[in-house]
Image (cartoon, rainbow, N blue to C red):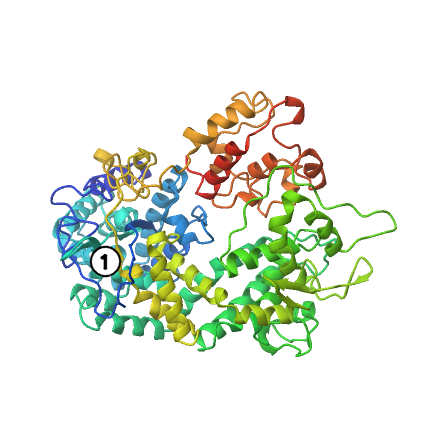
Amino acid sequence: MTLALGASLLAACAAKGRVGAPSAGSPGVGGMTGGTGTTGGAGTAQPPGTTMPTPAMFAPAPGALRRLTVAQYKNTIADLFGPNVVVPDLEPDTALAGFASIGAATVSVSPHLVEQLETAALSIAHQALADATARVTLVGCNPPSTSTTDDACASAFLAKLGRRAWRRPLATDEVAAIVAVVDNAQTVTKSFFGGLEYGVAALLESPHFVYREELGAPVAGKPGTLAFEDHELATRLAYLVWNTTPDDALLDAADAHQLSQGNGFATAVARLVASPRAATGTSTFFSEYLRLADLDTLPQLPTIFPQKTDTLGPAMRGETQRFLADLATGGGDMRGLFDSPTTFVNAELAKLYGLPAVTGTDYVKTTLPATGLRVGYLGQGSFLALNAHSNVTSPTYRGKFIREMLLCQSIPPPPMNVPPLPDDVPGQPQTMRQKLAVHRAVEPCKTCHTLMDPLGLAFENFDGIGAFRTMDAGQVIDASGDLDGKPFNNPRELATLLHDDPRAMQCLARNLYRYATGHVETAGEEPAVQQLAQGFATGGFKYASLVNSLVDSAGFVLAAPPVQDTTGAAGSAPATGAGGADGGAGGATGAAGGDAGVVAPSVAMPTYAKDVAPIIANRCSPCHTTDAKAGFNWSYDNLVTNTTVTNATTVKCTYLIAPARRVIPGDADHSLLWTKLTLDETQATVHNCGEPMPLASSGKTVPTSELDTIYRWIQQGAKP
């Protein structure tokens, strides 16, 4: 059966309605009354009985359609069909504000990902039903070999599988529509299981699978306030704690309305948190929060750091994951993130850290020397190597990470024409501290570097790969500094200050809130974030108390009505699915089709077509025009979709992170476009970034207001 025929069959199923704009009588995506598939918004809901009192001045954020992240997609497929089913390649997630979960709720689905999701659905369905013995166990019935159709068998199986896949019971007409797809396919393939593959693929390609439907339903007596109904609560809870689809027990509780009544939700939370599967959710949160996936592509040059191997970065990730798991699931005080004396090392890391040799390939829990400077997460290679250049350390990167990620403070982007660090005078090498002191004396750099550098310089005893050293440029390293006026002499003393700084654990609570809700908190949600941080502190800064405070918070169980999309962006990108009649199940990415959307971009969010393309056309011609006189056309596809930097010169730019990309949605600082717009010719040469844009010889400049627009466009997801 050809892919085109398969797509037409899926379209027949998809034509039931648009995501977020259900037609009369079609299955709803929000406000479902008991999960029966009635039209969205028809019912009411109430928050769980164990929800903490709503803080004064709290205003919830609108609900959303949140696309599954790649990890969530893979975990869900493994739960549905077993660990041996291979998920084909999917476009990597775009992290916004540090989290793939925020990117998945914000960034449009590219046409390429639409194709990949269709291919994946068909491939997974074929793998699941290919083995004659295993498929009987999966399906639960086995029609005679002479039968090509068996609607009773197909209906029972698809209803059971669909409940797990769509995270709610399917309505009768939904099952019937998919069975019709199966019947049509069986007629063509002359095979019951061959046709059933297309029913499974239809389930997996549906927006009801690809998107987490978390929209809420009206709360009786509270106009303008919505509460997530039982199946939405089950979905939010399962993907937070386990990072996968709800299991049958959780769906049973949702079917019976137990999550929104009495202590049912608290009982479900306790069961999920106590399960060994909770380690997956914890690991995913911290891996995204601390950028641990980037350790696969460390930029350090082996010619300068001979310890750099293909296995070193993954080993560092393994250390930090085990360290955090031990701290979080072992009931420890999460402030030990900064000053814990223990870590986990394998043979390669033990050698790098100068610790006693480890035999074998396993990690060993190790107590660090009490008199040493390596302590806590900030003494681990995952922090030290990720926040360094390819050839030298970067106190600025290290200090910036502490300020932004661990203290939740904002560091503005660097201004244009930032001068490079001074070169060494022949015979008079300077330490990094000395070079940065000169750099901070330049007024445009002073304000931000005064915030970042004193913290990052505390780690100068660790080189660009994380190995300990005592000298820099022939001089004894000075690791002293201050944290907002509180002095320290070395990284161990800084760790103590961070341990005692209330902003650090407040920041951890804030980031878990963002990860769980799929968005950066609004001003109206700030009271809930503060309440969460207080609950975390009251619980002795134990990770379990943080999770429990989060799921009991108003921000986790309440929503505001959807914001009407008046920008026209809701129908700008194709949806998952084959795009059946009237837009099919597909229509879109956070707000569907051309109808009223359910997730609107923030007011005045820049787009490429409206805001950025005119700037490039005006400031970057005649070099980068449609005829690409410079050898490259700055179109949206070339900037954002086909992102890989192939130029042999600019790919070596030290401001970029591997793999080098022209635009990284949500990360302007490591995007080639932003780098070339903000460097002068000297900086561009020193940092191997090619020529800056626009060239001085062109006589053109990019005003600050236009640079701000481009920066906001990248940071807010690089929308088309």
Near-viewer residue (621 or 136) = 621
- In the image, taking residue 664 as reference, residue 307 lies left or right, namely right
Classify residue 534 by image quadrant.
bottom left
| Quadrant for the C terminus in the image | top left
| Kind of residue at badge 1 | Phe
| Quadrant for the N terminus in the image | top left
Please rate how many residues cluster around mark 1, counting C-alpha atoms within 10 Å: few if below 14, some from 14 to 19, many from 20: many
Which residue lies under the disc numbered 1?
228
Q: Is residue 45 above or below residue 203?
A: below
Q: Position of residue 684 (x, y in %)?
A: 68, 37
Q: How many marks?
A: 1
Q: Position of residue 694 (x, y in %)?
A: 61, 28
Q: Position of residue 81 (x, y in %)?
A: 32, 60
Near-viewer residue (431 or 516) = 431
Q: Is residue 654 above or below residue 512?
A: above
Near-viewer residue (112 or 675) = 675
Helix, strand or loop for disc 1: loop
Q: Position of residue 396 (x, y in %)?
A: 63, 53
**Direction front: furthest residue:** 485
Q: Is residue 324 above or below residue 78?
A: below
- In the image, taking residue 432 as reference, residue 234 lies left or right, namely left
Q: Is residue 277 visible?
A: no
Classify residue 260 by image quadrant.
bottom left
Q: Residue at x 37, y 66 (%)?
A: 532
- In the image, taking residue 475 as reference, residue 454 lies left or right, namely left
Near-viewer residue (403 or 718) = 403
Q: Is residue 434 above or below residue 339?
A: above
